[in-house]
Amino acid sequence: MKEKVNKLAILTKGIIKENPNLVLLLGTCPTLATTSSAFNGMGMGIAATAVLICSNIVISLLAKIIPDKVRIPCYIVVIAGFVTLVQFIVQAFAEPLYNSLGVFLPLIVVNCIILGRAEMFANKNNPLDSALDGIGMGLGFTLSLTVIGAIREIIGNGTIFSSFFLGDPDAFTISLPFVSDNPMMIIALAPGGFFVYACVIAIVNKILDKKGKTPREFSCQGCALASMCQQEKCIAELDSAEIKKGVEA
């Protein structure tokens, strides 16, 4: 029973409690750039989730083979391979979405969420747990992008889920009464992205606070490059974590 609970915790923690966007504040660049519509946000989230799941599994399988000194470059090579594959698939089957996401699709290679989960989770756990972690974190990332994109699209354009999948922007566009006639265009622009993102983060923090599940305080140990950092603070925190781990063992 304990093992089942642990598996469920790994799968669900990324949705709210450790949401990569809204709690860990990772991947903010694609979040702000691709959430001009709900469709774009969802597409970006699904693409990143596919890369996250596949890279987590492969890195978990290769964790004992990859030399510690070159693990970060090796992780990036693995991630880049899956990003290229996803990029080709999106270009082949959803070219309008590919064109809409633009450079942010190949930039998944350097997404902090994917590299961070590879360093903090995948290389320390078995392939099944790593896959569950990828699914949970990817689901949280996709949900946050879709919600932010939907809010910006509704207020900024007066539509919801305007789809470019079939090459016709009006194919599945649902116009909303009143809002479509009086859109707040600034919400669909960059300043609106920052404003909506901040509001959603505030709402999530309020929900966690009411449930007594305050967001975790993540120190330098949560940084994917912490072990390579030469700052005294990082070194001290990592040494402290290793000592604590040895005492618990």
Image (cartoon, grey):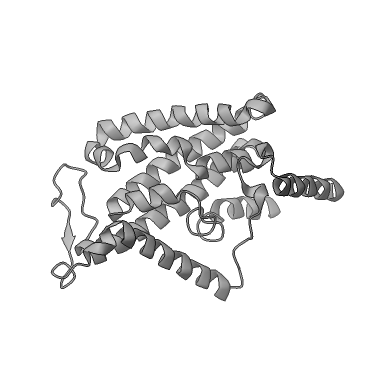
Quarter occupied by residue 124 = top right
Which residue: 24% across, 38% down? 99
Quarter that holds the N terminus = bottom right
Q: Is residue 186 found left or right of 105 in the rendered image? A: left
Question: Residue 56: image x %, image y %?
Answer: 55, 37
Question: Residue 116: image x %, image y %?
Answer: 57, 43
Q: Is residue 154 found left or right of 140 in the rendered image? A: left
Outermost residue toward the right in this view: 247
Q: Is residue 36 found left or right of 144 in the rendered image? A: left
Which residue: 57% across, 73% down? 209
Quarter occupied by residue 230 = top right
Of residues 121 and 243, the one drawn nearer to the viewer in this rendering: 243
Quarter occupied by residue 68 = top right
Question: Residue 161: image x %, image y %?
Answer: 24, 56
Of residues 57 and 220, the one drawn nearer to the viewer in this rendering: 220
Question: Residue 60: image x %, image y %?
Answer: 61, 33
Which residue: 21% across, 54% down? 162
Outermost residue toward the front in this view: 231
Number of disc labels = 0
> Does residue 214 sit above or below 237 in this rendering?
below
> Does residue 84 sit above or below 180 in this rendering?
above
Which residue: 84% across, 50% down? 248
